[in-house]
Amino acid sequence: MPGFLFMSFIATPQSMHFEEALPLQSGASIRDYVLAYETYGTLNAERSNAVLVCHALNASHHVAGVYEGQPRSEGWWDNMIGPGKPVDTNRFFVIGVNNLGSCFGSTGPMHTHPDTGEVYGADFPVVTVEDWVNAQARLLDRLGITQLAAVLGGSLGGMQALGWTLQYPDRMRHAVVVASAPNLTAENIAFNEVARRAIVTDPDFHGGHFYRHGVIPQRGLRIARMIGHITYLSDDVMNEKFGRQLREGLTPKYSTQDIEFQIESYLRYQGDKFSEYFDANTYLLITRALDYFDPALQYGGSLTQALARATAKFLLISFTTDWRFSPQRSREIVKALLDNRRRVSYAEIDAPHGHDAFLLDDPRYMDTMRSYFDSIAKEVHA
């Protein structure tokens, strides 16, 4: 809302322990695990105003607000969620969950296997989007929420929102899928594989059991992040922000190994920062979950048949310069939903920022989200 200054609120991390085993798509299972989560706002008496937010690759349950006494600790979608914001926590009870296999509080490869007493490392089971959705449903059971007003996610989070409509169609009323796709293209899988190879060929990786050696495969993580970051930005944004500017002065050093251009400096900074806080095995797990997601697969590739199970109302948003999850991919979902005569709204935002646009403050994007959640709020309080 123009002219308004929104202040961040204090967020409180929580966790829920689950002793019972969770069956996984791979045929394995995981038990005695923890899910980290945060909640914002108040659950109403009817328990009908809950919104689940699903996170993308390197995010977490810390969706909004700040941590007390920690400067620069805003949640990764703090511009979207909070009092008076598009997803208004004065009206909605918002839940952010950290997925299994992550490195931000939920049980992951750096935690202890309950059967062996050793750190999981590379032995952590492969998890899928469908497994994450099942784990999220268990958390909601514990919270006493039988039906969600909406499931919201961007990128990989959007895949989880789509998964919810297929696995638990009766437990949600709206799906908001932003900058996402019904599956990855071969090019996207290729980018993920190159990033994974950078990690597993790092001498400090030790087959995924680097914890035992007291080292971190930082070189591989740096390269993986640099590859990913290139795909999140548009060519226009890169050119506008960096162009062909040299890092120091106007004279090249004529070196093949020094940092010469500003874009090189930026990518190395992003890689260095990422390698200090993200877990290498988690990166492998989450990118593989991205690769595997394909609800149409069991229907001979027919997305229309796959989405016949969905009963939710949909909002899909894409961004014109997002070449990793292009508008065409969102339009595939829209067409499949219309083929099934489902209620769907679609916004294609002409924004220059590439895939990262779903995290930014484009007014048309924010207004679309605000308008849609306003309509959900009217349903909840009707």
Image (cartoon, grey):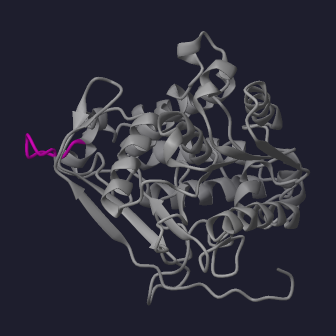
Q: Name the spot of residue 135 as percent of width and height, x first.
A: 36, 46
- Quarter holding residue 88: bottom right
Residue ranking furthest to the top: 300
Q: Name the spot of residue 282 as percent of width and height, x first.
A: 40, 45
The reply to whether residue 199 is visible in this rendering is no
Q: Name the spot of residue 212 as percent of width and height, x first.
A: 18, 46
Q: Name the spot of residue 153 as percent of width and height, x first.
A: 61, 51
**Quarter of the figure that contains the N terminus:** bottom right
Nearer-the-camera pick, 71 or 335 = 335
- Quarter holding residue 351: bottom right
Nearer-the-camera pick, 120 or 241 = 120
Is residue 191 shown above or below 27? below
- Quarter holding residue 4: bottom right
Query: Start and end of the magenta stretch?
Result: 113-120
Is residue 122 shown above or below 276? above
Identify the residue shown where x is 51% and y is 42%. Answer: 170
The reply to whether residue 288 is visible in this rendering is yes
Q: Left or right: where does residue 285 sit relative to residue 153?
A: left
Residue 118 is one of the magenta-drawn residues = yes
Residue ranking furthest to the left: 116
Residue ranking furthest to the front: 382
Identify the residue shown where x is 66% and y is 53%. Answer: 267
**Quarter of the figure that contains the C terminus:** bottom right
State whether the magenta stretch is mostly helix, strand or loop.
loop
Residue 115 is one of the magenta-drawn residues = yes
Identify the residue shown where x is 72% and y is 55%. Answer: 358
Identify the residue shown where x is 27% and y is 38%. Answer: 124
Is residue 70 shown above or below 110? below
